[in-house]
Image (cartoon, helix red, strand yellow):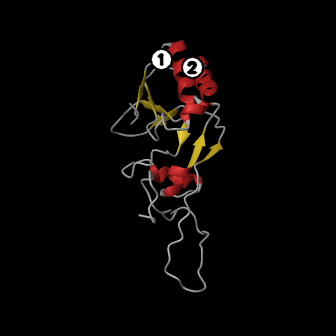
Amino acid sequence: MDDYFKGRGSQINTDNKFLKNKYVTEHDEVLDEPLLSNEKTQIFYEHPKKIVNVVKSPDIPGMYSMNPYQGCEHGCIYCYARNTHEYWGYSAGLDFERKIIAKPNAPQLLEKQFMNKNWEVSPIMFSGNTDCYQPVERELKITRQMLEVLLKFKHPASMITKTI
């Protein structure tokens, strides 16, 4: 059990299909010992220009989504959002759980979206890509602030979360 990351759904960093090059650790001695590195979770901040996204799917027509975070420290191995982390240059494996991208300007962007005269009210799906109530939410409170904006405008929304 020493070779196991407790609380992590993934135990390795998988290859990123979008990257041509990658850093690897080479053992000159050709040892077959695992090189485990249980790094702490890192938070990166991204400041997008918009937070509401159009879902272009024949299964869910006319739907919108918003994600205050990318990556998810819950680390559910079955999560369908893992592969989206590769777009950021990270792995869908351990990086998905240890490299969380937060969007601190999300509440302001949401309010700006609602103030747009062309905005037509339609339900917005919260966190269709990662859990908006993952551990970092306790300190950053981005989801809470976004919910306050939704309440202020009495705007319909739905949420996917594993947190009870």
What type is the residue that disc 2 sits on?
A: Phe
**Side (left or right) of 64 relative to 100:** left
Q: Quadrant of residue 104?
A: top right
- x then y, percent, for residue 153: 53, 13
Residue type at tag 1: His
Question: Which residue has dot 2 on it?
Answer: 114
Pick the front one: 97 or 104: 97
Q: Residue at x 59, y 78 (%)?
A: 26
Where disc 1 sits, the SS reads loop
Which residue: 58% across, 86% down?
29
Residue drawn at the location 45% of the way across and 53% of the way down: 8
**Total number of numbered labels?**
2
Image height of 86 relative to 28, above or below: above
- Residue sitting at 43 percent across and 37 percent down? 128
The picture places residue 24, in percent across and down from the top left corner, at 59, 72
- Identify the mark nearer the N-term, 2 or 1: 2
Secondary structure beneath dot 2 equals helix
Q: In the image as oriented, which residue stretches furthest toward the left? A: 59
Q: Nearer the viewer, residue 81 or 98?
A: 98
Label 1 neighbour load within 10 Å: few <14, some 14-19, many 20+: some
Proximity of marks 2 and 1: CB atoms separated by less than 8 Å: yes
Of tags 2 and 1, the one toward the viewer is 1
**Horizontal and vertical percent for residue 57?**
39, 40
Give how far across and how far down residue 17 sits, in percent. Answer: 50, 63
Is there any visible trace of residue 58 in the rendered image? Answer: yes
Mark linked to residue 155: 1
